[in-house]
Each structure stands twice: as C-alpha cells, then as structure tokens.
Image (cartoon, grey):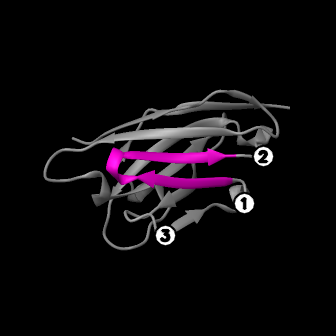
Amino acid sequence: QVQVEESGGDLVQAGGSLRLSCIVSTVSPYSFDDYAMAWFRQAPGKEREGVSCISWSGLDTVYTDSVKGRFAISRDNANNTLYLQMSGLEPQDTAMYYCAAAASNGASCDIEADHMDYWGKGTLVTVSS
C-alpha cells in the first residue's frame, strides 16, 4: 500500500510564497520513481482541479493555466518527496491541496484525477487579501 502525506499548508498574505511537500512511502518492489506525481486542489464549493504534475524522471511537467509562471513542481527521488513551490499567491489559490501518485506508464504525466492511484488527505492553503 502506497502512503501519501502532504505538509506545508498555511495562512499567507496575497503575493506571498509557500512550499508544499509530499512524502510518499512505497512497498517493495516499487519505488517512488515508479510513479508520476501530481498536485490537485479543491476550493470550498468548487470541484477538484488538477494543478500540476511531474513525470517519474522529473523531465516532464504540466501546469494548469491559472498557475503557470507562479507555481513550480519538483521531486526528489532519493528522498521520496514531491514539492510544489507557490509564489505570487492570490486569494483564489485558497484551497485544500492534495498530492496524488499514478503508476507511471511512460515519460509523461497528466492532471486527470481519474488517472491517479493514490491520494493524500490534503493540506490547507489559505491566502488572505
């Protein structure tokens, strides 16, 4: 069973920065780099949306339009950790942020929730105006 745990959510002022982390525990013979990883978010009263993803190698990344140029996804395969560096935060970025893992089947990734195999419980990001 793969376990996914997010951290780093906080209350921050608009224009500020925050870094989310996600630690993934895998079960042998699988390792962290057998999974493409992604961040999703869900704001109150809204549907969950894909924010960003990164391929197992880190060479391919995808961002939803609203965060391009402000957010950066990265991964440290040696330490089983996924990151989301967020800058230029806006009140509309307020949401519960979820980390998700998908068994990798190639060199790319996507931010389709139906393609994810494992989910964390989320970490709350609140951006005040």
Left or right: 108 in relation to 127:
left
Q: What kind of residue is marked 3?
A: Asp
Residue on which the image places disc 2: 88
Quote the CA–CA distance across marks 3 and 1.
Answer: 16 Å
Q: Residue furthest bottom?
A: 107
User: What secondary structure is found at the residue carrying circle 3?
Assistant: loop
Left or right: 8 in relation to 127:
left
Residue 125: percent from left, percent from top = 64, 32
What's the magenta region?
A: 71-86
Above/below status of 106 relative to 29: below
Q: What kind of residue is marked 2?
A: Gly
Residue at position x 71%, y 42% in the image: 93
User: What secondary structure is found at the residue carrying circle 2?
Assistant: loop
Q: Quadrant of the C terminus?
A: top right
Residue at position x 71%, y 39% in the image: 17
Q: Quadrant of the N terminus?
A: top left
Q: What kind of residue is marked 1?
A: Gly
Residue on which the image places disc 3: 60
Q: Residue furthest left?
A: 29
